[in-house]
Image (cartoon, grey):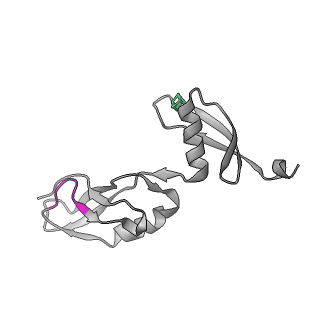
């Protein structure tokens, strides 16, 4: 009975492939106890990750001094915890890069202790 009280129903859109299955997931804490709507095992894995520690690739732009364009697109090298997105956004907003910038260049190392870097998505001379 206590388990039923602590069970939450969540809806996710699986983005593991272009099909985009709509998942309905029963969650207790961070544990998936039932998933519906997935048509393969990847959907269940996606739901488990979303329930336990959702990750997203961060994308934004940073100001670049002395470049041909005023800003450079950036992204996280790997997906980072969704819960850290606001912290990362604030940190990236403070950044002023200096030209030249090379695609893949690390602009912030281990951003906000997430274990991933913010890198330039293009080169700017
Ligand atoms: S559940 Fe499987 S088929 Fe559906 S979107 Fe996810 S990966 Fe694709």
Q: Main secondary structure of the magenta part?
A: loop
Which residue is found at the position 25% from the left and 61% from the top? 106
| Residue drawn at x 57%, y 48% as measured from the top left | 50
Range of magenta residues: 101-106
Residue 76 vs residue 28, the one in the foreground: 28
**Left-right relation of 24 to 104:** right
Report the residue that reaches farthest toward the right: 1
Q: Is 108 on the left or on the right of 64, as rendered?
A: right
Is residue 105 in the magenta section?
yes
Give percent across and percent down for residue 36.
67, 32
Q: Residue at x 53, y 33 (%)?
A: 42
Q: Is residue 97 above or below residue 38?
A: below
What residue is shown at x 48% (from left), y 36% (from top)? 16
Residue 111 placed where, x, y %? 37, 66
* Residue 48 position within the rendered picture, expressed as x and y whole percent measured from the top left: 59, 44
From what the image shows, is residue 55 above or below residue 41? below
């Amino acid at each position: 009975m206590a388990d039923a009280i602590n069970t939450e129903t969540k809806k996710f859109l699986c983005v593991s492939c272009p099909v985009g299955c709509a998942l309905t997931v029963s969650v207790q804490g961070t544990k998936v106890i039932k998933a519906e709507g997935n048509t393969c095992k990847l959907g269940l894995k996606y739901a488990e990750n979303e329930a336990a520690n959702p990750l997203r690739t961060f994308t934004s732009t940073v100001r670049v001094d002395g470049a041909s364009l005023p800003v450079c697109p950036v992204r996280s090298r790997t997906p980072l915890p969704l819960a850290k997105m606001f912290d990362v956004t604030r940190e990236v907003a403070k950044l002023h890069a200096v030209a030249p910038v090379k695609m893949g260049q690390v602009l912030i190392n281990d951003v906000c202790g997430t274990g991933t870097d913010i890198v330039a998505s293009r080169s700017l001379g």
